[in-house]
Image (cartoon, grey):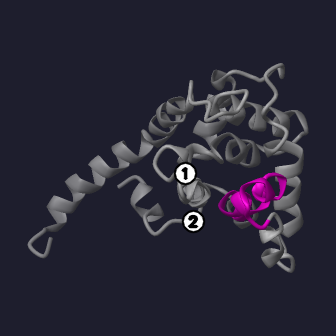
Amino acid sequence: MDEGTAADWQIIGGEYRAFAKGLPDRVLAHLKLLDGDFGGFPVCRLEHSLQTATRAHRDGRNEEYVVMALLHDIGDTLGSYNHPEVAAAILKPFVSEEVHWICQNHGAFQGYYYFHFLGMDRDVREQFRNHPHFEACRLFCEKYDQAAFDPDYDSEPLEFFEPMVRRVMARPRVSLYAAAMEDA
């Protein structure tokens, strides 16, 4: 890299912009990997994601929140031990600090509903009690995440959410590389 020229980086930057614009397609394709993976639940992980997003959408949440609800468990395939952080990292450039925080910490909050059955502390979320987004994350898990395992729920299909994903991920709001997305 120390031998690169401005001309080299013009080419690389152009390729980067084209590649980055394909992020929504790659995210949607990766989300489809959750299809058919039940993990012992009555619905597969994709259906759980669709239910979570549908519930948030029908409750009037904005698009970035709905997209977070859709993608909150996308990290299950590659980050089995830290899936919330994987999903949050994908979303961070595109969403508010609050929505990012909800995604990043939903695992600890969701644990309230089942950690005690696994010999874990169901109140692990209490470490965040004084955080300004505690209640928002608690509500996300209560209203949308923990409720989204209903095999009879009428979820919207993934295609319904695709335009939202594309709009939310159209341009990063917070990223070291945001300037590179500007047309040269």
Q: Answer left or right for 99 relative to 8.
A: right
In the image, which residues are magenta? Answer: 101-121
What label does residue 174 carry, if any? 2
Is residue 126 in the magenta section?
Answer: no
Residue 7: percent from left, percent from top: 15, 61
Is residue 110 in the magenta section?
Answer: yes
Q: Secondary structure at mark 2?
A: loop
Mark pair 1, 2: CA separation: 9 Å
Can see residue 170? no
Residue 93: percent from left, percent from top: 56, 60
Determine crowd level at label 1: few under 14, some 14-19, many 20+ residues with C-alpha closer than 10 A.
Answer: some
Residue 127: percent from left, percent from top: 79, 78
- The amino acid at mark 2 is Val
Q: Answer left or right for 54 relative to 95.
A: right
Name the image quarter holding the N terminus. bottom left
Magenta segment, prevailing SS (helix, strand or loop): helix
Location of residue 121 with respect to 39 vertically, above or below:
below
Name the image quarter holding the C terminus. bottom left
What label does residue 171 carry, if any? 1
Residue drawn 88% across the image and 33% down it: 58
Residue drawn 13% across the image and 68% down it: 5
Q: Secondary structure at mark 1?
A: loop
Residue 70: percent from left, percent from top: 68, 39
What label does residue 9 carry, if any? none
